[in-house]
Amino acid sequence: MKHPGKIVPFLIVLGLLLAGLQIDEAAAAPRPNPPSGTSEPIRITGIRHQPTSSSSRVVIDLEAQVPFEGHRLSDPPRLYVDLFGVNLSRPLSWKTVSIGDGIIDQARLAENRPGVVRVVLDLAGPGEHRIFSLPDPPRLIIEVKRKDGKAPSDQVGEARTAARRLKIVIDPGHGGKDPGAIGPGRLEEKEVVLDISLRVKRLLDATGRYETLLTRSGDVFIPLEERTAIANSHKADLFVSIHANANTKKTARGISTYRLGMNPDQDAVELAARENKTSRRKLSEVELILKDLVLTSKSNESILLAQTVQSAMVNETRSLNHNGSDLGIREALFYVLVGAEMPAVLTEVSFITNLEEEKLLRKDAYRQALAQGIVQGIEMFLQESKRVTSRAN
Ligand SMILES: [Zn+2]
């Protein structure tokens, strides 16, 4: 990795921060193994309630990140999360926190068996939830949204969030004369990514929190350069380009998310060459823009966005794509991302050239899971970047 001197330490810090970011859902995801008995248990140092504009959160403060496992029970509605390799610090040896905000009634914390602490949330009713851990400071967050999407009753700052809705541009790759990659069963990338993008837009619109724009909503050709120009001219806050991967190796499979960067691996070079095919932009021109870009903070924000989108997509599709693989976040010279004035990423949702993944990409359920992952990743990014910004101020 070659970066100008001042940027390197920051990127390393950010990389460490990102490496520790995990998301989890109570679904059928494989669980990390609890740490072996020889290591010192990690202590839970606190539990607190945190209402946000759209949900109710319980935050468990820890000395370090630990493996966890969440479960949902319906009668009465409650949620429990086991944390492995942990001890309760003495004042917390048994604790109930009453919340009563119309979403979570109370949170209970107790040692379930040696080295395992169970957090139980008694819920006011059905609602979506997610569980994720953040590294700095180490904490586990259990977030619950009410089914009707209403905010908790004791929330603050509603007027402020209503003032300006964030603008998100979703870019379905290819279109019109450019079909993109084509699978062994003749499925076309342009059709799959448009459908996923429309699903992403519906999910984002349903929250009422965003203004969502699509670079194309039908089967039309749009030059790569115009796609970011659309986002820039609308002063968008985020840009997410959606594609399906292809490889001459039929066994290649998995999900990956890219940011613009100058240090691609060999696969990324080939992928970018294919995705850039329709561009008339000269490489020398692109490299000039890139030198600028590495010096801006958008590059670091794009790393965070790539990370949250990638992990949420992998998580959401795990139960449908049993042999799927997490190819992680990568960088490449995608022309469609060049010149974006906002955090911008390109996601390759699966390999259309892989027989099994092509079949999955035909399925509604798989497309929906990918869309949900992208939306969840966007929301996690927004929450995390807001936190970093407010801490820096
Ligand atoms: Zn593509």
Image (cartoon, rainbow, N blue to C red):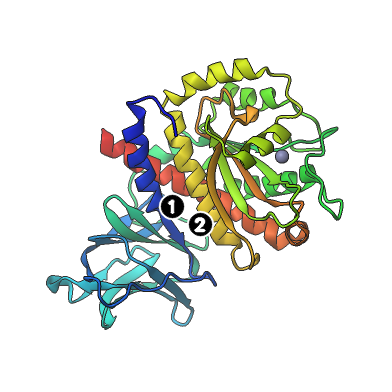
Query: Would residue 90 be visible to someone looking at this image?
Result: yes
Cα distance between the residues tagged 1 and 2: 7 Å
Q: Crowding at label 1, few (<14), some or many (≥20) Cα neighbours within 10 Å?
A: some
Q: In the image shown, does 239 or 303 lie closer to the viewer?
A: 303
Corner quadrant of residue 279:
top right
Task: Kindly state the secondary structure of the residue where label 1 is placed.
Answer: loop
Q: Residue at x 31, y 60 (%)?
A: 65
Are dots 1 and 2 in contact, CB under 8 Å?
yes
In the image, 147: left or right of 362?
left
In the image, 29: left or right of 58?
right
Q: Residue at x 37, y 36 (%)?
A: 11
Within 8 Å of ligand 1, the CB of disc 1? no
Residue situated furthest left in the rendering? 91
Q: In the image shown, does 223 or 391 lie closer to the viewer?
A: 223
Q: Crowding at label 2, few (<14), some or many (≥20) Cα neighbours within 10 Å?
A: some
Q: Residue at x 75, y 28 (%)?
A: 222
User: Where does label 1 land, which residue?
Assistant: 54
Q: Which quarter of the rendering shows the C terminus?
A: top left
Corner quadrant of residue 82:
bottom left
Q: Which quarter of the rendering shows the N terminus?
A: top left
User: Where does label 2 land, which residue?
Assistant: 149
Image x and y of residue 132, in percent:
41, 59
Say which label, 1 or 2, has the lower sequence index. Answer: 1
Image x and y of residue 294, in percent:
45, 25
Amino acid type shown at disc 2: Gly
Image region (quadrant) for ligand 1: top right
Amino acid type shown at disc 1: Ser
